[in-house]
């Protein structure tokens, strides 16, 4: 079965307030089976335009990634991100 991913590209506008999102999203997504593969770190955009921060969370399936993103507890915490950052969030199915 192909893995599923939540991919995020984020530019934080208020770093201090954004910390609350990072502290709260991690245990929720981990409890839903998510594993952080990429979370910030050094990056370089070599083609096109990009936001500043990149995150990749792996799940055992696309369906589980979608379920985690739509989870009411996660969505409540995601509002913190939305208030303090510009973001593009993409659900992606991996390859077998």
Image: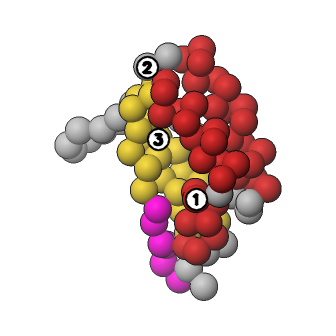
Q: Residues under labels 1 and 2: Cα distance?
A: 24 Å
The earlier-in-sequence mark between 1 and 3 is 3
Q: Which residues are magenta?
A: 91-96
Residue 53, percent across and down? 45, 34
Q: Nearer the viewer, mark 1 or mark 3?
A: 1
Q: Is residue 61 above or below residue 56?
A: below
Name the residue beneath numbered marker 3.
Answer: 54
On whether residue 83 falls in the magenta region, the answer is no
Contact? badges 1 and 2 (CB < 8 Å): no
Question: Which SS class for mark 3?
Answer: strand
Viewer-side residue, 33 vs 73: 73
The earlier-in-sequence mark between 2 and 3 is 2
Residue 91, percent across and down? 46, 62
Name the residue beneath numbered marker 2.
Answer: 13
Residue 65, percent across and down? 59, 65
Residue at 60% x, 85% y is 1
Name the residue beneath numbered marker 1.
Answer: 70
**Label 1 environment density (alpha carbons within 10 Å; few <14, some 14–19, many ≥20):** few
């Amino acid at each position: 079965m192909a893995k599923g991913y939540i991919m995020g590209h984020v530019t934080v506008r208020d770093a201090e307030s954004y910390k609350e999102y990072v502290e709260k999203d991690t245990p929720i997504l981990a409890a839903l089976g998510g594993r952080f593969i990429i979370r910030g770190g050094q990056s370089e955009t070599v083609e096109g335009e990009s936001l500043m921060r990149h995150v990749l969370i792996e799940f055992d399936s696309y369906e589980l990634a979608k379920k985690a993103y739509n989870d009411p507890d996660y969505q409540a915490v995601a509002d913190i991100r939305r208030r303090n950052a510009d973001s593009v969030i993409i659900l992606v199915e991996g390859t077998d």
